[in-house]
Amino acid sequence: MTTTAPTSVACVFDAYGTLLDVNAAARAVSGELGDLWEDFSILWRQKQLEYSWLRTLMDRHADFWSVTGAALDHADKALGMDITPDLRARLMALYMTLEAYGEVAGVLDALKAKGLPLVILSNGTPRMLDSATRHAGIRDLFDAILSVEEVAAYKPHPSVYQLAQDRLLIPRERILFLSSNGWDIAGAASFGFTTAWINRFNRPRENLSHGPAHELRDLTSVPELVEHLRR
């Protein structure tokens, strides 16, 4: 178990949409999906999240691989895509090897050089996260990769954020939680983490009770933010 001094800061990252480009799978086969590939990718992601929230609310957990497949099938039917079994299998396989955003590796290297604990806290299954981070070449930069499968509930349930605090054993406010998902930021802020919203697509803030302490366009300035928080 990782332990750190009370005055230290740890960085906890969401994976999908924050480190990993969730549109990369559909983009890779956009020629086969046709003109609707972007609509398909957006709906696939939307339903993936909706199903995770609904399953937690209903106490009917299924792992993220199953949820991702169910969301893909819904998007296919909703848009009348008629995706073949072969293309479906390739889309699912591509989700195991999503590309990281361009600045991710360099930022993680810089944070690692500062001696900061780095953790992923994600809805993904351990197998999905291990595969994607290894493909992106960032797996060994993390001290821990935590999956919601440990608590059988999805973010933004508080039990998920508790996983990170239990691992790091530092005050909540000394944990910098970074996510591109506004709803995830709201959940982490409500839990008590210091939050940085990675607003990659210039979206408006969510109208929820808890918002981000910091808002960034991408991860590039995170090392500078960490230095500010360490003072």
Image (spheres, rainbow, N blue to C red):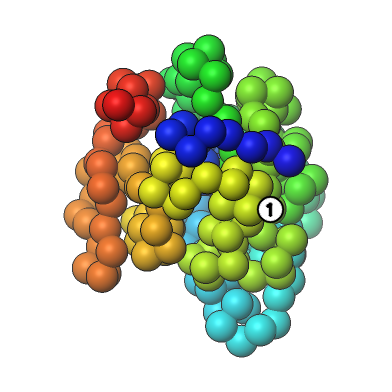
How far from the left and from the top, in percent, is residue 126? 76, 48
How far from the left and from the top, in percent, is residue 152? 71, 69
Dot 1: element: strand
Task: Decide if residue 186 is on the left or right side of residue 81.
Answer: left
Image quadrant occupied by the C terminus = top left
How far from the left and from the top, in percent, is residue 44? 53, 59
Q: Residue at x 70, y 82 (%)?
A: 60
Could you classify mark 1 by the number of other residues whose Cα lies within 10 Å: few (under 14), some (14-19), or many (20 or more)?
many
Q: Residue at x 58, y 34 (%)?
A: 4
How far from the left and from the top, in percent, is residue 182? 34, 56
Q: Residue at x 26, y 58 (%)?
A: 211
Q: Residue furthest front?
A: 6
Q: How many marks can you see?
A: 1
Q: Is residue 68 above or below residue 165?
A: below
Residue 72 placement: quadrant: bottom right
Residue 183 placement: quadrant: bottom left
Q: Which residue is mark 1?
A: 147
Residue 20 placement: quadrant: top right
Image quadrant occupied by the N terminus = top right
Depth order, front residue of 67/91: 67
Q: Is residue 45 visible?
A: yes
Q: Amino acid at mark 1?
A: Ser
Q: Residue at x 67, y 59 (%)?
A: 148
Task: Decide if residue 62 is on the left or right side of residue 36.
Answer: right
Task: Decide if residue 105 is on the left or right side of residue 87.
Answer: left
